[in-house]
Image (cartoon, helix red, strand yellow):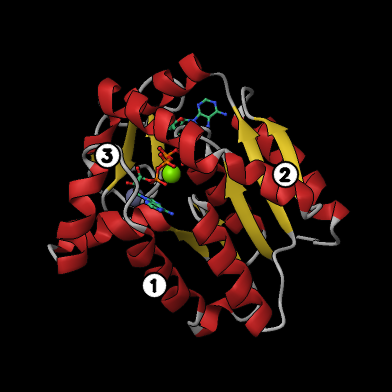
Amino acid sequence: MNLILMGPPGAGKGTQAELIKASYPVPHISTGDMFRDAVQEGTELGLKAKSYMDKGQLVPDEVTIGIVEERLAQPDCKEGFLLDGFPRTTAQAEALDEVMSKQQRRIEAAINISVPEEVLIQRTTGRVSCTRCKSVYHVVFNPPQQSGICDKCGGELIQRSDDEEETARKRLQVYQQQTSPLLDYYEEHGILHNIDGNRDAMQVFADIQEVLASIGKSQ
Ligand code: AP5
Ligand code: MG
Ligand code: ZN
C-alpha cells in the first residue's frame, strides 16, 4: 500500500503509524525521525535540519525531497510505504507524484487526522519518545510503565527540543500556512480520508483500518 498520514503536529501520525505497521507489513517513513536521526549523528544534513526544526520551521524542499526520493528507492519500499510528515508543501506533493508516476505507481490514500488546537498543544508538550526505537509516549495520556524508560526496548525517553509550547505553536502556524492547503490537493485527487483524531488511539486506528479495508487492503 502507498499511503500518506497527514495532520498537524501532535495529531497522532507517529502513534498511528506504529499501530499500522504492527498489522500491515509496510515500512514507516517519517521525515521528522530521519532528520532527528541525522541531528543525533551530527551529520551535515543534521546540522542543517536542526537550524530549521528548532525554530519550528520546515526544512527546505530541496533537502527534504532529496532524502525522501532516496528512501523510496530502497528495496523495502517496492511493495509500498507509509509516509508520515511528508509531503508538507505543494512542491513536495508534486515531487512525490512525479516519483510515483515514473515508477507507474500512485498514492492510494491520504489519511488526515484532525484534532482541536488546544489538545494538540497538550499532546506535544507532554510527549516523550524513545531515542532507540522511536516509540512515542505521553506523560499523562500514555505513560510508560517506568518513567523515562521505553516499555518496548528499554531505551531512554526524551522530550523533543521542538516540543516546548512556543515552538509547538509556531509549528501549528506553519502547518496552517504551508501544509493544510495539501488537503484540497488530495481531495481533488479523490484520495483524501478525514478521521477524527480526538479520541482514544485505538478508536482512531479502527477508523484507519476501515479506510484501508475500503481500498482493498487486508491485514
Ligand atoms: P515531525 O516529526 O513530522 O513532527 P510533526 O508533524 O510536527 O508531528 P509530530 O511528530 O509532532 O506529531 P504526530 O502527529 O506524529 O503525533 P504523535 O503520534 O507523536 O516534524 C518535525 C520537524 O521536522 C518539522 O517541524 C520540520 O522542521 C521537520 N520536517 C519533518 N518533515 C518535514 C517535511 N516533509 N518538510 C520539511 N520539514 C520537515 O502524538 C503526539 C503525542 O500525543 C504523543 O505523546 C502521543 O502519545 C499522544 N497521542 C497520540 N495519539 C493520541 C490519542 N489518540 N489520544 C491521546 N494522546 C495521543
Ligand atoms: Mg511524529
Ligand atoms: Zn524504545
Residue 66 is labelled as 1
In this view, the mark in front (3 or 1): 1
Q: Nearer the viewer, mark 1 or mark 2?
A: 1
Estimate the spatial distance between the alpha carbons at disc 3 and disc 1, rounded to whole Å: 34 Å
Amino acid found under the numbered disc labelled 2: Ile
Residue at (37% x, 33% y) in the render: 171
Query: In this view of the protein, can residue 126 be seen by the observer?
Result: no
Q: For label 1, count other residues whose C-alpha is less than 10 Å away and answer few (under 14), some (14-19) or many (20+).
A: few
| Nearest the eye: 185 or 15 | 185
Q: 78 or 193: which is nearer to us? A: 193
Q: Which residue is mark 3?
A: 149
For the C terminus, give its image quadrant. bottom right
Residue 212 x, y percent position in the rendering: 78, 53
- The residue beneath circle 2 is 208
Q: Is residue 20 above or below residue 73?
A: above
Residue 1 lies, in percent from the top left, at 70, 67
Answer left or right for 94 relative to 167.
right
Residue nearest the viewer, comparing 86 with 134: 86
Element at badge 2? Answer: helix
